Image (cartoon, rainbow, N blue to C red):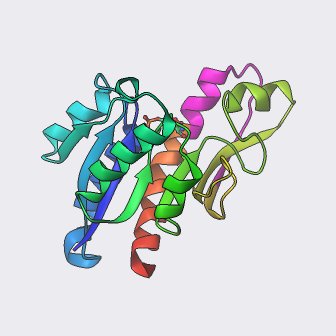
Amino acid sequence: MKNIVILISGTGSNMAAIVRAAERERWPERLGARVAAVISNRPDAEGLRTASKAGIATSVVDHKAYAGREAFDAALRAAIDAHEPTLVVLAGFMRILTPAFVGHYTGRIVNIHPSLLPAFPGLHTHQRAIDAGCQVAGVTVHLVTAELDHGPILAQAAVPVLDGDTADTLAARALAHEHVIYPRAVASLLKNI
Ligand code: GRF
């Protein structure tokens, strides 16, 4: 069985979309894959409860308990590798990872970013798109590499920026597309690794 480990920091709606797709599309039978665990760096992440209710193993590696990035990444890596993952999925995971950590999972760690990369890596993407006068914004699934928000693109969806949009209204429109393209990209990757 190919184990998927999903990392979250908050709501976990992308994680939940992947869990729903795995059930609906019967990934264990059809892809030989399952969501094995959900790990959060924040003990209060709402997504932990969602995952538990779905019967998925959860754990917390609290970044505040570690002196530095290397120590945190080492603990996180141990927690992930305990589940022998084929694929690591970052889903609203709000920590910058060290190159050594990313290198350990080369080709099998993915992220979703709320912009049409390579435009707007980093934070506050929707506000930056509005401020730049973009007429189109969007979301990107990409392989994770050492450079933040820069890995090879696996899937994208574009959404219009409408008159009167705020960062919140644009984010909500984009998030609905994240929930469609992320499970699809994960499923297609699972067929090839
Ligand atoms: C998503 O917009 C994702 O692209 C971004 O953070 C948000 C996480 O949402 N990195 P959720 O936790 O999956 O609901």
Q: Residue at x 78, y 45 (%)?
A: 119
Q: Residue at x 53, y 44 (%)?
A: 97
In the rendering, at what x and y percent does residue 143 appear?
A: 57, 61
Task: Give the vertical position of 101 relative to 175 (above or below).
Answer: below
Task: Give the vertical position of 151 relative to 127 (above or below).
Answer: below
Q: Is residue 178 magenta?
A: no
Name the one closer to the observer, 131 or 52. Answer: 52
Name the one closer to the observer, 3 or 178. Answer: 3
Indicate the quadrant where residue 135 lies.
top right
Residue 128 left/right relative to 65: right
Q: Residue at x 39, y 47 (%)?
A: 74
Task: Give the vertical position of 41 relative to 33 (above or below).
Answer: above
**The C terminus is located in which quarter?**
bottom left
Part of the protein shown in magenta: 157-174
Residue 57 left/right relative to 164: left
**The N terminus is located in which quarter?**
bottom left
Name the one closer to the observer, 99 or 120. Answer: 99
Q: Is residue 166 magenta?
A: yes
Task: Give the vertical position of 131 relative to 144 (above or below).
Answer: above
How many numbered marks have been drawn onto this rendered protein structure? 0
Residue 175 visible from this viewpoint: yes
Q: Residue at x 50, y 41 (%)?
A: 176
Residue 181 visible from this viewpoint: no
